[in-house]
Image: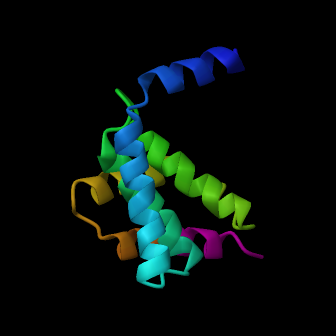
């Protein structure tokens, strides 16, 4: 099953769009001094969500990558998947900025702390 999922993902990927999205993140880190883990996660979400690098599920992929980036940096977000999905849509359609989205991610993480 995993091989089929990875194969499907690779077949549906438009490499130039993904490379461009990831390049925007790298440029923000290197040239703009972006170093806040939640802002970087928000940039992943936004860049991949609008890149149209996949035939379907661009917003879900952007959100999943953002959450995985946070997890890799020891910030686990476990609750409110529906809220995050709605917030992701608001980010992509321009109702929220990346900073707004990063604040929401941080707030959700903070609310889970003992």
Residue 109 vs 7, above or below: the answer is below
Q: Furthest residue to the left?
A: 94
Q: Is residue 106 magenta?
A: yes
Q: Main secondary structure of the magenta part?
A: helix
Q: Position of residue 8 (x, y in %)?
A: 52, 19
Does any portion of residue 103 appear in the rendered image? no
* Quadrant of the snapshot with the C terminus: bottom right
Query: Which quarter of the figure has residue 6?
Result: top right
* Quadrant of the snapshot with the N terminus: top right
Q: How many marks?
A: 0
Q: Which residues are magenta?
A: 105-114
Viewer-closest of 108 and 38: 38
Residue 89 vs 28, above or below: the answer is above
Residue located at (28% from left, 54% from top): 92
Viewer-closest of 77 and 9: 9
Q: Is residue 13 left or right of residue 52?
A: right
Residue located at (37% from left, 28% from top): 56
Query: Which quarter of the figure has residue 59?
Result: top left
Residue 69 vs 27, above or below: the answer is above
Viewer-closest of 45 and 112: 45
Q: Position of residue 37 (x, y in %)?
A: 58, 74
Q: Position of residue 65 (x, y in %)?
A: 55, 50
Query: Which quarter of the figure has residue 95?
Result: bottom left
Residue located at (46% from left, 54% from top): 84
């Amino acid at each position: 099953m995993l091989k089929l999922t990875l194969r499907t993902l690779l077949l549906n990927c438009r490499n130039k769009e993904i490379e461009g999205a990831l390049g925007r993140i790298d440029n923000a880190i290197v040239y703009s001094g972006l170093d806040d883990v939640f802002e970087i996660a928000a940039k992943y979400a936004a860049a991949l969500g609008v890149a149209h690098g996949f035939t379907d599920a661009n917003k879900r992929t952007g959100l999943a990558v953002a959450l995985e980036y946070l997890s890799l940096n020891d910030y686990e977000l476990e609750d409110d998947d529906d809220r995050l999905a709605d917030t992701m849509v608001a980010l992509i359609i321009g109702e929220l900025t990346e900073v707004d989205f990063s604040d929401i991610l941080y707030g959700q993480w903070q609310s889970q702390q003992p």
